[in-house]
Image (tube, helix red, strand yellow):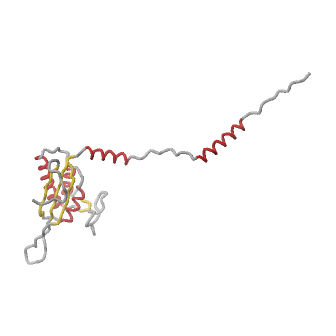
Amino acid sequence: MMKYSTTYDKESQAVAQGRSLPVSTKACVNICAMLRKKNLARAKVMLQKVIAKKEAVPYKRYNKDVGHKPGPIGAGRYPVKACKYILKVLNSAEANAKDKGLSKELVIEHINAHIAARQFKHGRQRRRQNKRTHVEVLLAQTTKKTVEKKVEVQKKSEPAKKVEEVPKASDLAKKAVEQKETVKETKEPLKVEKVDKK
């Protein structure tokens, strides 16, 4: 049995591996980065869109001379073959989760791609190697903590209310002096009636 690059709980998490898949490791690395921490149902839809060439995989690594694609992703490509194989691995992990009795709300907690042993190709042209990649997937149930974190992130993203500025002591003193002066000006002089002395 091959080891995983992360620890996992056998009771509450499901795993699956694709060994020596005949696909590009560079493409798989970018696909895994796109799917990591995503909901399983959403991840499968994303892969199906890439296979249909309706959505591109953002290439954050190995993107030299890679053209930009539609949408806010920058450099990207449509690695159809790699997406088909990774979709099979995800379906395998989902089946393992069902056997364990896990809920339908699953999240891709961990997904990783590693370079595998590459055999040399047959034929007259020597020293050419096949593309081989190992892919490992770990699925976990959505917990209350993840839901609470999402709520906190939404609250932080909301615009903060403007806090009223507290006036400085010097400003308050100036206002008090001005008010006293205005009170003095508004006060009417006392009228003194003259009394005739007889």
Seen at 28% across and 45% down, the residue is 147
Q: Is residue 153 above or below residue 62?
A: above
Between 121 and 157, the residue placed more toward the observer is 157
Between 98 and 50, the residue placed more toward the observer is 98
Seen at 69% across and 37% down, the residue is 183
181 relative position to 163: left or right: right
Seen at 66% across and 43% down, the residue is 177
Q: In which quadrant of the rendered view does residue 144 lie?
A: top left
Q: In which quadrant of the rendered view does residue 30 lie?
A: bottom left
Between 29 and 50, the residue placed more toward the observer is 29
Where's residue 109, x and y in %? 21, 53
Q: Single out the residue that lies furthest toward the left.
A: 123
The image shows a total of numbered marks equal to 0
The quarter in which the N terminus is drawn is: bottom left
72 relative position to 2: left or right: right
The quarter in which the C terminus is drawn is: top right
Where's residue 169, x and y in %? 59, 46
Q: In which quadrant of the rendered view does residue 117 lie?
A: bottom left
Q: Single out the residue that lies furthest toward the top.
A: 198
Q: Is residue 14 above or below residue 20?
A: above
Where's residue 24, x and y in %? 17, 65
165 relative position to 93: left or right: right
34 relative position to 84: left or right: right
Where's residue 36, x and y in %? 23, 55
